[in-house]
């Protein structure tokens, strides 16, 4: 499954024009890293396990909605953890992905090279595309 998720992430990021990203799978009361693209090793180690409510992915899980920033390095809202600033990107979004029952099963993160505001229409399109995440139910 890990290879399938890694391949999906690579394709997803290319389709949306993102330069880096992650797939975290829900596990217990948090998220387990399942795939990463262009994320420094030190950051990957820091986000192997993300508790609900911590960082962008954890906040997306806790809130049940996308969390975004227009600049990873200069975020003032507190949703970006210090380690995320090591990613060579600016704008970023973490989006919960739900199964057919409406339960969050994963959080997909995408980061873009340039600083930008991710508007509602773009966010809806990104969320729609993230729903193509391969099935992770056993």
Image (cartoon, rainbow, N blue to C red):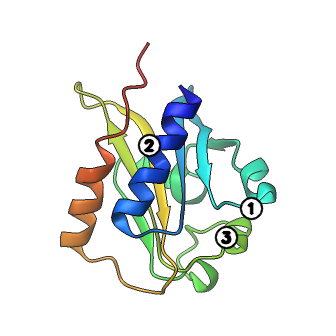
Q: How far apart are marks 1 and 2 (CA)?
A: 19 Å
Assign a secondary structure to mark 1.
Answer: loop
Mark 1 = which residue?
A: 40
Q: In this view, does 138 lie to the left or right of 87?
A: left
Q: Closest to the observer: 127 or 52?
A: 127
**Chain-order first, disc 2 or disc 3:** 2
Residue 45: percent from left, percent from top: 78, 48
For the point 32% across and 30% down, the residue is 103
Front position among marks 2 and 3: 2
Image quadrant of residue 6? top right
Quick check: marks 1 and 2 in contact, CB under 8 Å?
A: no
Give how far apart the Cα atoms at labels 2 and 3 are: 20 Å
The label on residue 23 is none
Residue 27: in sight, yes or no? yes
From the top left corner, tell me how far across and down residue 52 is, in percent.
55, 43
Is 72 above or below relative to 94? Answer: below
Q: Where is residue 101 in the image (x, y as percent from the top left)?
A: 23, 24
* Residue lying at 40% horizontally and 70% vertically, measured from the top left: 17
Seen as rendered, the residue at the extreme top is: 138
Q: In this view, does 43 lie above or below 100?
A: below
Q: Is mark 3 on a helix, strand or loop?
A: loop
- The reply to whether callout 1 and callout 3 are in contact (CB within 8 Å) is yes
Q: How many marks?
A: 3
Q: Which residue is drawn at 44% across and 38% down?
A: 106
- Circle 2 residue: 8
């Amino acid at each position: 499954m890990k290879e399938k998720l890694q391949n999906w992430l690579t394709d997803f990021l290319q389709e949306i024009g993102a330069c880096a990203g992650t797939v975290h799978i829900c596990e217990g009361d948090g998220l387990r890293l399942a795939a990463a693209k262009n994320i420094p090793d030190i950051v990957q180690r820091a986000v192997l396990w993300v508790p609900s409510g911590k960082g962008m992915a954890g906040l997306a899980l806790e809130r049940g909605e996308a969390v975004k920033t227009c600049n990873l390095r200069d975020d003032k809202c507190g949703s970006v953890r210090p380690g995320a600033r090591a990613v060579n990107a600016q704008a970023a979004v973490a989006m919960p992905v739900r199964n057919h029952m409406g339960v969050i099963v994963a959080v997909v993160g995408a980061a873009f090279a340039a600083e930008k505001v991710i508007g509602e229409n773009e966010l809806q399109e990104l969320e729609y595309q993230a729903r193509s995440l391969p099935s992770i139910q056993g």
